[in-house]
Image (cartoon, rainbow, N blue to C red):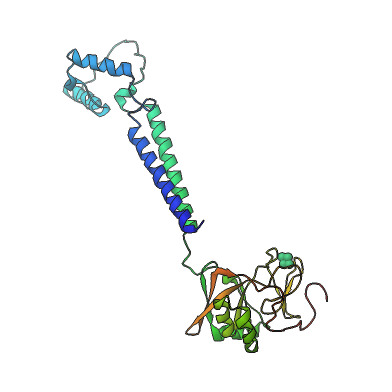
Amino acid sequence: MSSGAIIAIVIAAVVVLGALAAITIGRGRDVRGAGALTRETRQRDKQGVSAGTQLDTIASSSKEVEQAAADARTSAGTAITPVGNVAPVPWVAPDPEVIGATRRHFLNVSMVSLMGISLASFGGACLAFLYPKKGGGFGSKVAVGKLEDIVSSITANGGFYYFPAARTWITAYPKDALPKASKAYAAAPAVLSGQTNGINALYQKCPHLGCRVPNCPSSQWFECPCHGSQYNRVGEKKAGPAPRGMDRFGVSIVADNVTVDTSIVVLGPPIGTNTTGQEAEGPHCVGGK
Ligand code: FES
């Protein structure tokens, strides 16, 4: 499934869950079990009204009750009248229906709110994870630098230049191998483009079981320490259990600026491909031959 489809599914799920949370909060006070009045209470209220209860004399909120009490205190003056030896009146819990919110209603709203916040955080994290990077890291097009500087770095580092942001080994591709390369890499024009300009961008991951393949300065090959697969300097397989040559990336060069496209991994050439004819130039690092 593409990342676009996954993003669409995550957005749809967050929207649906958000709508459900909003509906639940909106209906929280109308449904049974979420602070609603019981049928008996509603019937009692109706009977009270039909019996001539004056609704405008009933305080509709705790604020109005408090205000009425404050008014009564003010109109009665500020003098404190001793009450004498009166027995204390036992405390009676306030009626939740007068206060306007039951404990159950409060808990329902709290749980739904927390669930909504959690889902929103999760959805945001998913989107952030799936959103394509624009920073040019691995998995996208990575600017490596000027072609001239890259060629100098390859020479200065003994034939191998490693660029960590692209997880790529860049090596020189000999011009005299281009006729063979144009046939062997015809199916991968982006790879051929780099070779035509004298460089080769190889994925560091071994095509056998995925170990990172280091260069071997003495043999001038790549030699995998895990199971001993060996590849020449342009990543064509020479020995070991690997099923093909090293995988690689397309290279584009505009105004001497080199970009390696790590969003597409081009599978390495089949066993037997040997466009450069390079043999080991010294002792091997792996295998001891
Ligand atoms: S992982 Fe490299 S040879 Fe097995």
Residue sitting at x 76%, y 80%: 219
Give 68 or 289, whichever is nearer the viewer: 289
Give 181 or 89, whichever is nearer the viewer: 181
- Dividing the picture into quadrants, the one containing residue 278 is bottom right
Question: In this image, 53 relative to 83: left or right?
Answer: left
Give 78 or 284, whichever is nearer the viewer: 284
Residue sitting at x 19%, y 22%: 72
Coordinates of residue 16 in the picture (x, y in percent)? 40, 44
- Quarter of the C terminus within the rendering: bottom right
Residue sitting at x 39%, y 43%: 18
Question: In this image, 255 relative to 224: left or right?
Answer: left
Residue sitting at x 45%, y 45%: 119
| 40 up-or-down from 114: above or below | above
Ligand 1 positioned in quadrant: bottom right
| 236 up-or-down from 211: above or below | below
| 269 up-or-down from 85: above or below | below
